[in-house]
Image: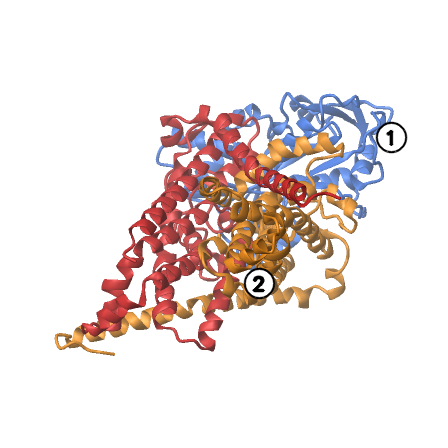
Amino acid sequence: MISRQLTQRIAFTVITLAALLVVLPILAIVVYIVIEGVSAISWEFLTAMPRDGMKAGGIWPAIVGTLWLTLGTAVVAVPIGVGAAIYLSEYAGDNTLTRAIRIAIINLAGIPSVVFGLFGLGLFVIFLQFGTSILAGSLTLGIMTLPIIISTAEESLRAVPQSFRVVSISLGGTRWQTIQRVVLPQALPGIITGIILGLERAAGETAPILFTVAAFFLPRLPQSMFDQTMALPYHLFVISTQVPGMPVRIQYGTALVLLIFVLSMNVVATLIRRRYRSQRFW
Amino acid sequence: MNVAPSHSKSQAWLEFLIERAIQIAGISAIVLVALIFFFLIREGAPAFTTVPLTSLLVTRWYPIEGYYGLLPLVLGSLIVTVGAAIFALPLGLMTAIFVGEIAPSWVRDILKPFIEVLAGIPSVVIGFIGMVALSPLIRVALDIPTGLTAFTGALLLAWMALPTIVSVAEDALDAVPATYRDAGLALGMTRWQVIWKIVVPAARTGVLTALMLGVGRAIGETMTVMMVTGNAPRLALTPRDLFLPVRTMTATIAAEMGEVAQGSQHYFVLFAVGLTLFVITFIVNMAAAAVVFRQVKRAERVLS
Amino acid sequence: MTIQNKGSDTMVNLALAWAERYQALYPEARIAVTGGGSGTGIAALINNNVHLANASRRIKDEEIASARANGIDPQEYIIAHDAIAIIVHPSNPVDQLTLQQISDIYSGKITNWREVGGEDRPIVRLSRETNSGTHVYFLEAVVRMNDPHNRTLFSPDTLLLPSSEGIGAEVRLNPNAIGYDGLGYVTGDMKIVAVGLDAAGPFWPASVELVTSGDYPISRDMFIYAAGVPEGPVAVYLAWLMGPEAQKIVLDLGFVPYQAEAP
């Protein structure tokens, strides 16, 4: 009969191994991409236009495109998202409408990214005639990012103690003044964390931009929001599946740039969150 | 609502507008979900009128010749998702237990952000690594004809779903009151017995929620499966099919959407596939939502 | 204005090379290139989203009808020729196959390499996606042996890979694999299998010369479809594409320059 101590030791070992099994591949993927890709990184790679059928030169237009799309996503998702969060946290009562909104948010969060792409193609590109454009892509990505921003923003707003609001109102402020001058500033770091995490996801997505904005090769950088653009995730997909004789180095280099772009947003968000938690007034 | 004496008329008017805007933003989520749903129906419903229902149930998916059998696609998504769940649930639960109950706090502080890093890795990057590094490995290790299989996809999807599963499960474990643990220890149980026989069962609804959310994530994944599952529209009916190529619904949409002329049969059918995906994830999410409300503490990880 | 050029993945690198060269020569010119497959290009043409659609297969009658219904009158230009090479892993001992054998392999009748003189290995069939002109051409010319009444289909366990390089990647790594692709996508680390019309031979490996001479059995035209008769910058670009410099690029990339008279 196995002693309970032995059972515990076995169980804990298995579990620790499981955790390692989860963590090590993450490390392996990141390290592998760094090792294979770092040789491609250079100032030229980051700032030059691609040459020779993408096999040489740089990925500057893809980087710029991803930046534009991230900005566009923010423009679409932040006002609506933060607004919805303020509504849910400060105005909404406990009624059926509120419950319906919450259910809708959870569902929006679970919709597959390719279905967003389909929706974006059908509504923005074709029906509203925006064509494949940064506008269509940003709208699609923005809607996709909405749930993340709404829930993190709402949580940050809720975390502000009720006493802050009470004091403000007792001093004669209106509800909106209270929100604008007291609650929002306190909740801002948390809201910003959520926005960054949401934009991080949008920057890395390929399926929603496949048919709403992405192009294989454009002669110059996008000039307006009605233009197509190259983008890092799509670029990686294309150069790893479509171009013969593509130096492996460049594929890994592009993957590395995308990884750095996305993960640095993660780091920034985490740092803001940490600092926020330690600096709160409550 | 108190109005301070210095509150001018125009300020009140501005506030009124702002609050209206906030209310509109509030219901935006409902509006958008409804919009997506109706749009998918509008573009997908004609599939059911122009393509006879029997055609949609055949076993062949070959749209350029009019074969619109959805079955291989649904089975493809199913086998990859089930495979992912089989890997992800035990791994996710065990990791959650490790992070929440066993690991010393310094390990926890490193581990949690690290797992979130995985959530941030773009799916196209994971697909890329899967295609060039993992699938040849699998082909050689398992001695199968090709490494581009449902198994490869399931493996990668399991990893991608793990951050969601781990954080929600960990929240659930964390929510179990300390008194439960104390009671167990007071009765002389080992830490492991407390975890396995008290804490985990107490948190089981949360763990189930975690799995459902992870599954929802896996069903919806597109780029990774498009690059590593081979995209062959086979009927995946037996467990053996796990080690053969499959074609998922998501990869089908992504691969074929560009080539359809607006208003063609193929166009409608692809939207119908999108609608199917929407409905499936809707159901899964509703089931999870019933429980998840109580578990939401760190919502950003729930939805990442 | 930016000339929109979309379509065939087979031709996308060619289109890119053309665009790069043309814009180097004429800096005011603007050309945007996107892939997605011949089907995508033709769909864009029908939807009036593109000036020049690249296609590695001929446009279908239904597509012409859809375009005309939308007010577009597609104009066809043959811009190059291409050989479809049959490729396998370098270690594969099989050197030649008849067209019938290739058809039987892809339709699922032949499942093991030893049935065609190779090792005892299962055959892993690689193909392009259905939106690819190469796929459609292969279906008609090889699987159906150019017989319009033949309704044979690809075997359902044929892997439909995202693009030509996807096929290349798997062929390079997997000794069980057989794939088909435009000659421009064949690299030195793959083996080309010679193709013959019957078992007695002769068997021809894919090459530019054999396409030009008309001997290679699986070669095809590469098309550009314009949305109506081209005018202005589009017309100038199209004329340049038919000119010697663009055709030299065709050759450099492994395709066959177009000939004014069909061989």
Nearer-the-camera pick, A244 or C124: C124
Nearer-the-camera pick, C43 or B229: B229
C153 with respect to A218 (left or right): right
Residue B288 is tagged as: 2
The chain coloured blue is C
Disc 1 residue type (three-letter): Glu
A176 with respect to A31 (left or right): left
Secondary structure, mark 2, is helix
Colouring of the image: by chain
Q: Can you tell which quarter of the image residue A183 is in?
A: bottom left
Q: Can you tell which quarter of the image residue C233 is in?
A: top left
Q: Which residue is mark 1?
A: C115
Q: Position of residue B207 (x, y in %)?
A: 59, 56
> Residue drawn at (39%, 41%), measured in percent from left and top?
A267
Disc 2 residue type (three-letter): Ala
Q: Position of residue A35 (x, y in %)?
A: 49, 26
The chain coloured red is A
The answer to whether tags 2 and 1 share a subunit is no
Q: Position of residue B140 (x, y in %)?
A: 72, 29
Nearer-the-camera pick, C58 or A68: A68
State the count of labels.
2
